[in-house]
Structures are given as structure tokens and as C-alpha cells.
């Protein structure tokens, strides 16, 4: 592998699973990059979270979307997050310390592959921002998340491709892939929203209609 390619692979690894000092830097970049900040607050707004909603974010990173969502829920709502990086857990916990202290936010170290009982739900909304691309077996994971949503519960899966040379067509291709994954996992009413950054952010929203998904075998 060339030096350039191995450096690129090391950077991608840090966004997949931030670890140690390099992971701290990756988290700082995610938290301060203007496009990341806009991406996260845009997705949180699209979910239209109500004060009583119970919301779950997978792969919260430095906790930008958690912070937005934590401002939207009231005493009867709650925001949960899970991320497999202890470095991200530390950064997001610091960023959301007041909301955690106030009992509106709970952040958990763990993987989407094995959601802990604390995340059995039911949830009113689930989101993942630039995270699903890292999951193994995404249809199975989305199916499990759908089963943790209440009837009519919403999901938002957002992607802003960060590969070198990514363009609008890369983003649109990502939206098509996410739509297929959500439909394969039994979600209904898929629709795509686009935020015109460079490259654009796509967010595919969908709804859990248990009647439509009834009788489906579990995907795992
Ligand atoms: C590129 S970062 C995006 C972070 C954040 N959502 C944002 O947009 O700022 C991807 C995040 O997903 C987390 N992640 C990746 N795979 C995961 C998995 N299988 N389970 C839980 N978290 C995961 C990583 O640790 C990382 O924090």
C-alpha cells in the first residue's frame, strides 16, 4: 500500500472507531467542522422531535445531534445514545453534561451489533448520522431498530460521503442505498431530504408501520 493510501486508511479508521490521541483529534474535527455542525442540527430538526419523545442515536460521535435533541425534549422525554468508542463517549458526555445531569440524556458505550437491555425501547425516533456505512449487516441492525420503535415511530439515516472526490452523485447514490436498506428492513414511507453542502448531505426518513411489516421473518 502506498504511504498516501495507508495514511488515508488510518484516518478512515479513526472515524469508524476513534481511539487514543488520534481519536481525540478526530472527535475535535467532527465537533468543530462547520459542515458537521450544520449536518447534525439539520438531521435533528428533520426528525421533528416532540417534548415527550424518547429518541435513540446510534454512533453519536462528539455528541452534536444529542445536544440538539436534548434541548428539544422535556421532562417526559429522553434522549439515548450509543457509540462503541470510549473516546467519543468522553467527548459527548462532556458536551452534554448539563442535560445528563438534568436526567434528559443517557449515553452508553456499546455497539449497534448488541444493543443493551437499557435500549429495548420503545422509541419514538431513531437516528444515525454518518455511521451506518460502518455497520456490518445493516439490514439486520435496521430491522432490530425498527422493532424497538413504537408504531408510527420515525427513523432518520443521514450520510455526507467523505471519500476523496465525493460529489452530488455520490450523495444521491448513498441515498438510494440507504432507501433500499430501510425498505429491506421493513420500513415504510421512505423519503429523501438533501442539504446543499459540498458534497450534499442526504437524509433518508422512514416510518415503522407494524401492519406493513407484520409476518416478516426476523432478518437475523
Ligand atoms: C463518522 S463518526 C460520526 C459521528 C456523529 N454522528 C457525527 O456526525 O458527528 C461515526 C461514529 O459512529 C460510531 N460507530 C461506528 N460503528 C459503530 C457501531 N457498530 N456501533 C456503535 N457506534 C459505531 C463511531 O465510533 C463514530 O463515533
Image (spheres, grey):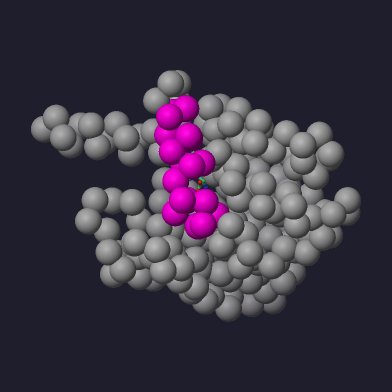
Q: Which residue occupies the foreground of this view, 83 or 136?
A: 83
Against 42, residue 7 (above or below) is above
Q: Is residue 101 visible to us here?
A: yes
User: How many tags in the picture?
Assistant: 0
Helix, strand or loop for the magenta stretch, by majority: helix
Does residue 32 show up magenta in the picture? yes
Residue 139: x %, y % from top left: 48, 58
Against 123, residue 3 (above or below) is above
**Horizontal relation, residue 32 to residue 177: left or right:** right
Read off the magenta span.
Answer: 23-40
Residue 146: x %, y % from top left: 63, 61
Q: Which residue occupies the foreground of this view, 102 or 204?
A: 102
* Quadrant of the image occupied by residue 168: bottom left
Against 121, residue 47 (above or below) is below
Residue farthest along the top direction in this orientation:
20
**Horizontal relation, residue 175 to residue 169: left or right:** right
**Horizontal relation, residue 25 to residue 59: left or right:** left
Q: Which residue occupies the foreground of this view, 117 or 76?
A: 76
Q: Dividing the image into 4 quarters, which one contains the N terminus?
A: top left
Residue 58: x %, y % from top left: 58, 47
Q: Residue at 63% across / 64% down in the picture?
A: 45
* Quadrant of the image occupied by residue 35: bottom left
Residue 116: x %, y % from top left: 68, 38
Q: Which residue occupies the foreground of this view, 121 or 108?
A: 108
Q: Residue at 43% across / 29% down in the picture?
A: 25
Does residue 185 show up magenta in the picture? no
Q: Residue at 24% across / 37% down in the picture?
A: 8
Residue farthest along the right direction in this orientation:
75
**Horizontal relation, residue 169 to residue 69: left or right:** left
Amino acid at each position: 500500500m502506498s504511504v498516501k493510501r495507508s495514511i488515508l486508511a488510518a484516518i478512515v479508521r479513526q472515524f469508524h472507531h476513534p481511539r487514543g490521541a488520534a481519536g481525540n483529534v478526530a472527535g475535535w474535527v467532527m465537533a468543530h467542522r462547520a459542515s458537521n455542525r450544520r449536518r447534525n442540527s439539520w438531521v435533528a430538526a428533520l426528525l421533528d422531535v416532540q417534548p415527550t419523545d424518547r429518541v435513540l442515536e446510534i454512533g453519536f460521535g462528539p455528541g452534536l445531534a444529542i445536544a440538539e435533541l436534548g434541548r428539544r425534549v422535556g421532562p417526559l422525554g429522553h434522549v439515548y445514545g450509543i457509540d462503541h468508542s470510549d473516546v467519543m463517549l468522553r467527548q459527548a458526555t462532556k458536551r452534554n453534561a448539563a442535560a445528563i445531569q438534568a436526567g434528559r440524556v443517557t449515553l452508553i458505550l456499546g455497539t449497534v451489533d448488541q444493543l443493551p437491555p437499557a435500549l429495548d425501547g420503545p422509541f419514538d425516533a431513531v437516528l444515525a448520522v454518518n455511521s451506518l456505512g460502518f455497520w456490518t449487516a445493516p439490514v439486520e441492525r435496521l430491522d432490530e431498530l425498527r422493532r424497538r420503535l413504537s408504531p408510527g415511530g420515525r427513523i432518520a439515516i443521514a450520510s455526507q460521503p467523505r471519500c476523496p472526490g465525493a460529489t452530488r452523485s455520490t450523495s444521491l447514490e448513498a441515498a438510494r442505498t440507504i432507501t433500499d436498506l430501510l425498505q429491506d428492513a421493513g420500513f415504510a414511507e421512505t423519503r429523501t431530504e438533501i442539504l446543499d453542502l459540498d458534497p450534499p448531505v442526504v437524509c433518508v426518513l422512514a416510518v415503522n408501520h407494524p401492519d406493513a411489516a407484520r409476518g416478516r421473518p426476523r432478518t437475523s
